[in-house]
């Protein structure tokens, strides 16, 4: 494989009033893999995965609106909901002429990916989830104050979550459940910690926390997609995740009996500590189902 083929390019695509940053690598004629990051991350979380996949696949990894290097408008000019973010990504894919792709999802990237799947199931060739949830039993106790906010979105309940969009909390998310913190690069949580301090960003993130209730409401629709379409599915799960429990990964076996579910002794950002274990598994899974 020519090394130039697997070089990563860093580009922007104007999608409505969003200047969407994305990483791209691999031959465009190869099967496409779309990488969708979650909170609090960006396409940077896939930095080691992208060149490995690019040997055989065309890899696209955008920064979602309000994350990473994507240049997003204020909340007065853009509707920060998962439905609207999905619409932005859907338009982005259309502009790039991509109509068939596997998805690799993490955290917030999961409900974006699930929405793409239920709206255009013919576009999805396979699914990999790294702690991207689709079942209520996957929601850990840490969601309790968030659920209270969903139930009663008062200023008091919003204020109770004020720690959530802070650099300190983001760092904690990267390190919780990790036995050796020296394996976690500080770049990811530092970059996202800087992002969260930008004017208006904390409010945007709290709006997204509130709208996450819409994802849970749609879980039955997502699960129906899994049952009806039976997409090839691999879950590579940090078993010590304080937000998404292993039960959420195991639940896929109810709907997709052939799903491949694997757990690793780490936290929410499993690729940070166990990339050398997980990346070959993802690569082999995609090669099996796409090549």
Image (cartoon, helix red, strand yellow):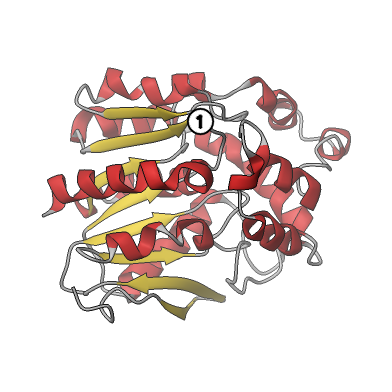
Residue 227 location (% of width, % of height): 24, 27
- Asked which quadrant contains residue 198, the reply is bottom right
Residue in the image at 14% along x and 46% along y? 289
Query: Quick check: 153 left or right of 138?
Result: right
- In the displayed structure, 17 sits above or below 231; it is below
Q: Which residue is mark 1?
A: 217
Residue 76 location (% of width, % of height): 72, 66
Query: Quick check: 8 left or right of 230?
Result: right
Q: Nearer the viewer, residue 82 or 57?
A: 57
Secondary structure beneath disc 1? helix
Can you say which quadrant of the picture contains the N terminus?
bottom left
Can you say which quadrant of the picture contains the C terminus?
bottom left
Residue in the image at 26% along x and 50% along y? 283
Q: Nearer the viewer, residue 46 or 195?
A: 46
Residue 19 location (% of width, % of height): 54, 77
Residue 71 location (% of width, % of height): 61, 74
Residue in the image at 16% along x and 51% along y? 287
- How many badges with numbers are in the image? 1
Look at the image and tell me whether residue 210 can be seen. no
Look at the image and tell me whether residue 66 can be seen. yes
- Asked which quadrant contains residue 77, the reply is bottom right
Residue in the image at 32% along x and 72% along y? 25
- How crowded pointer 1 is (Cα within 10 Å; few <14, some 14-19, many 20+) is rated as few
């Amino acid at each position: 494989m020519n090394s130039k083929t697997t070089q990563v390019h860093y580009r922007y695509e104007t999608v409505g009033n969003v200047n969407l940053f994305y990483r791209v690598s691999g031959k465009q004629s190869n099967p496409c893999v779309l990488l969708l990051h979650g909170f609090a991350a960006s396409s940077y979380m896939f930095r080691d995965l992208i060149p490995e996949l690019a040997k055989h696949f065309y890899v696209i990894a955008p920064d979602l609106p309000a994350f990473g290097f994507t240049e997003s408008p204020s909340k007065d000019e853009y509707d920060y909901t998962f439905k609207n973010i999905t619409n932005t990504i859907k338009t982005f894919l259309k502009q790039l002429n991509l109509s068939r792709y596997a998805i690799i999802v993490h955290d917030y990237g999961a409900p974006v990916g699930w929405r793409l799947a239920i709206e255009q199931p013919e576009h999805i060739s396979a699914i990999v989830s790294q702690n991207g949830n689709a079942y209520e039993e996957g929601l850990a106790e840490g969601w309790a104050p968030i659920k209270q906010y969903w139930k009663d979105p008062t200023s008091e309940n919003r204020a109770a979550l004020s720690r959530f969009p802070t650099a300190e909390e983001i760092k904690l998310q990267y390190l919780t459940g990790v036995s050796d913190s020296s394996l976690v690069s500080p770049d990811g949580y530092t970059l996202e910690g800087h992002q969260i301090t930008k004017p208006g960003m904390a409010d945007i993130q709290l709006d997204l926390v509130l709208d996450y209730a819409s994802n849970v409401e749609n879980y039955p629709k997502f699960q129906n997609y899994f049952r009806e379409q039976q997409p090839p599915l691999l879950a590579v799960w940090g078993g010590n995740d304080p937000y998404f429990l292993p039960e959420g990964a195991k639940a896929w076996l109810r709907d997709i009996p052939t799903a491949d579910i694997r757990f690793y002794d780490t936290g929410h950002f499993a690729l940070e500590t166990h990339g050398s274990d997980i990346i070959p598994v993802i690569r082999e899974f995609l090669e099996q189902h796409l090549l």
